[in-house]
Image (cartoon, rainbow, N blue to C red):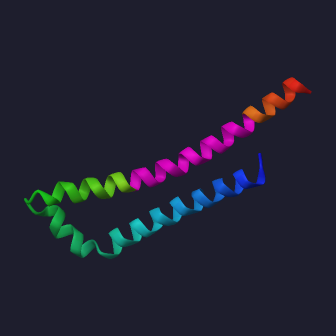
Amino acid sequence: MKVQTRNKYVFWLLFYLLASTVLYYLVFSYNENILPIIQSKKIIAPLLAMFIVLAASELYGNVVSIIFKNTLEKKLNLNRLKRKG
């Protein structure tokens, strides 16, 4: 794997982990403000809940995707080198 590619993976991995940490910090620190909105009967309640869930799952999904992609690329490169050598 190239150094630039490895640095790119590490950068995006840390970015998504930091973004998910910020999201959870905001959700848990402003829980007393979010909870009445979610428990209300207004249309914004399910929208806010879905936004929080989708944002968190998107961030974690990107982290897992980066880890799997990096691991699979390493395995494929090792197999290519074994075939050539």
Residue 15 position in % (x across, y down): 54, 62
Give the number of marks.
0
Q: Is residue 68 magenta?
A: yes
Task: Report which quarter residue 45 is drawn in.
Answer: bottom left
For this orientation, the residue located farthest to the right is 85
Q: Position of residue 35 (x, y in %)?
A: 21, 68
Q: Residue at x 34, y 76 (%)?
A: 29
Outermost residue, front side: 4
Which residue is painted at 73% across and 32% down in the image?
Answer: 76
The question of residue 54 being in magenta is answered with no
Q: In the rendered view, tell whether residue 28 sits above or below residue 9.
A: below
Eyeballing the image, is 16 above or below 65?
below
Q: Among all residues in the image, which is located at the extreme top? A: 83
Residue sitting at x 61%, y 42%: 68
- State left or right for residue 11 relative to residue 54: right
Query: Is the N terminus in the top left, top right, bottom left or bottom right quadrant?
Result: top right
Q: Nearer the viewer, residue 11 or 49?
A: 11
- Quarter holding the C terminus? top right
3 horizontally vs 36: left or right: right
Residue in the picture at 29% in, 75% down:
30
Q: Which residues are magenta?
A: 56-75
Q: Does the magenta stretch mainly form a helix, a strand or a loop?
A: helix
In the image, taking residue 49 as reference, residue 84 lies left or right, namely right
Res 10 → quadrant: bottom right
Image x and y of residue 25, in percent: 40, 71
